[in-house]
Image (cartoon, rainbow, N blue to C red):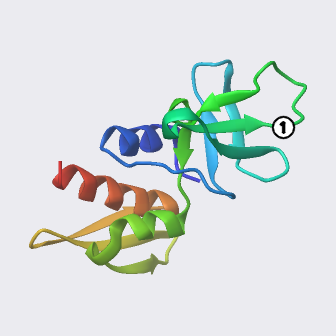
Amino acid sequence: MISRQLASDLRDAGLMWTPVKGDWFVIPDHGLDQLEFVVSDMVIETRRMAMGRQMLAFNGTTEWAMDTLAASDALWLPRENQLREVLGEAFIGLEHIPGETPGYAVSTLIGNTEERFVDVDVEEAYARAALALLRSTS
């Protein structure tokens, strides 16, 4: 799972989120900062409200008084496959880096420049590559 800071940077760079079942997210600034949530048909589902606004509905939660939350108020934590999708044709490949501190390198072609993003976590490497791509197009 990517860091909250990197998820926030992706959102600030223009990464849009349309919540679907299986998506992970956090709710900053509501006293729930340390909790991670997942969209599910059983507990948290998406609802389209008036004027097309996406809402997250919390079904059966008794821990706090929150029935719905605008999806824009949540912070999406995209998964590896979702980040690879963001990269699209810019994605060249993924390489496992063995060693004492193993890691992963994501190679991309951004503009005419091949770039490599390395991290110990594969999702973080993908997220860094996606962030660079988003920033290059803004």
Q: Is residue 109 left or right of residue 48?
A: left
Q: Residue at x 58, y 26 (%)?
A: 28
Q: Amino acid at mark 1?
A: Asn
* Front residue (pair 87, 16): 16
Numbered disc total: 1
Camera-side residue of 97 and 44: 44
The answer to whether residue 63 is above or below residue 76 is: above
131 relative to 80, above or below: above
Q: Is residue 8 above or below residue 68?
A: below
Q: Residue at x 50, y 61 (%)?
A: 123
Residue bearing mark 1: 59
| Residue situated furthest front in the rendering | 50
Q: Position of residue 75 (x, y in %)?
A: 53, 38
Q: Quarter-wise, where is residue 27 in the image?
A: top right
Residue at the (34%, 68%) spot, across then down: 87
* 126 shown above or below 55: below
